[in-house]
Amino acid sequence: MKKRASPLSASSPSSASSVAFSRGRLWLGLQLVIWLSVLACSLALIRIAARSPSLDAAVGEETPLSGGTPKIAFLFLSRSHLPLDFVWHAFFQNAEEQKYSIYVHSEPGFVFDRTTTRSPFFFGRQIPDSIKVIWGESTMIEAERLLLAAALKDPANQRFAFISDSCVPLYNFSYIYNYVISSPKSFVDSFLDKKEGRYSPKMFPTIPRDRWRKGSQWITLVRKHAKIVVADTVVFPAFRRFCKRLSGGALGGKQKNKEATKKEHDCIPDEHYVQTLFSMSQLDDELERRTLTYTSWNQSIDAKDKRSWHPKTFEFADASPQHFTEIKGINHVYYETEYRTEWCQCNATFVPCFLFARKFSRGAAMRILNDGLVGPFDAGSFFFPDS
């Protein structure tokens, strides 16, 4: 049987003009969507550029550093005490005092003194306005902002390095200082997040999808970028509202929660916040897009065949000089989502990628100390402080 053409398919002048009119409307609609998207992005950038008076007051009046020695502010994020304080004691013991400062965010009310740490380098170094931090919530990035705000009050602080409480240095202070200070760029691990459904459409238009980034929270910033993080009043509120880990009910897998689970986005704020903020601020060219902290990741599979990654803890047997040498010999990082190989550079010079490593147990940290991998260590000044 032959099919007859519908009368509507005949090429009459009236039908041609109708098609042209429909196409015109479609084209105008597409143009409108494009212009609205551009407008949304522009408004978000304008809002980011606006500084917050309250945060400006927290940072204080900016006094340019003129002729003084620039310092690295070491910003420790700790649950309570610092379990590896003896390693960092050895590290700072061989440092020039005018080249560094120390700030610690711990649980509210925790004080670093002779009863909580054996290292005098940490006495009184806790910030006074600390908050209770819960992993996977926006309180983590809020703690980071508090540390930066405290460190920015000292104009001599020109670099800001976040340090985990399970982190150890791979080199002595002199090497790390020269490496970090010599670079005019921040070290921020940042890459496209294509595979994971962490971005929530509710973030739009404040955070456009194409500006969403992921990376390690262990970053090292120049002063300009530290101020941008502290002054942000646009991206942080959006993260606090929409970037959250899945609730216990959604993770339970019950039938009645299946639809809710589909709508939720398992988002870890500290793995996205700074990276997304800088992407929206058009700062990619001012970054070395990598972290200075080495982490070994293990993949695990839970009872529901859900794959997840967890940082490996280095035990005593893992902290051999050979393993240390292997980590220090890494000179590039491959980013699968961008098909990008990041050859590690500092001020246009090829260098080892990592200055720090995590997560180390106390036994592993004691081994690297005994092997002299961090530098000379005067045990008497640590274990038997003057009374």
Image (cartoon, helix red, strand yellow):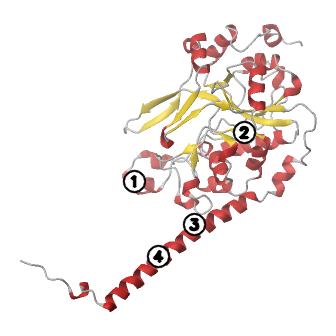
SS at circle 3: helix
Disc with the residue nearer the chain's start (3 vs 2): 3
Give amino acid for label 4: Trp
Q: Are marks 1 and 3 in contact (CB under 8 Å)?
A: no
Q: Are marks 2 and 4 in contact (CB under 8 Å)?
A: no
Give amino acid for label 1: Lys
State left or right for residue 328 relative to residue 57: left
Q: Residue 57's spot in the image, x, y percent? A: 87, 52
The residue where tag 1 is placed is: 258
Residue extending furthest toward the left: 1
Q: CA distance from mark 3 to mark 2?
A: 30 Å
* Quadrant of res 48: bottom right
Q: Is residue 167 visible?
A: no
Give amino acid for label 2: Lys
Disc with the residue nearer the chain's start (1 vs 3): 3
Q: Are marks 1 and 4 in contact (CB under 8 Å)?
A: no
The residue where tag 4 is placed is: 27
Q: Residue 383's spot in the image, x, y percent? A: 78, 11
The residue where tag 3 is placed is: 37
Q: Residue 349's spot in the image, x, y percent? A: 68, 29
Total residue callouts: 4
Q: CA distance from mark 3 to mark 4?
A: 16 Å
Out of 182 and 163, give the one closest to the viewer: 182
The residue where tag 2 is placed is: 185
CA neighbours of label 2 inside 10 A, class few (<14), some (14 to 19), many (20+): many
- For the N terminus, the image quarter is bottom left
Disc with the residue nearer the chain's start (1 vs 4): 4
Q: CA distance from mark 1 to mark 2?
A: 45 Å
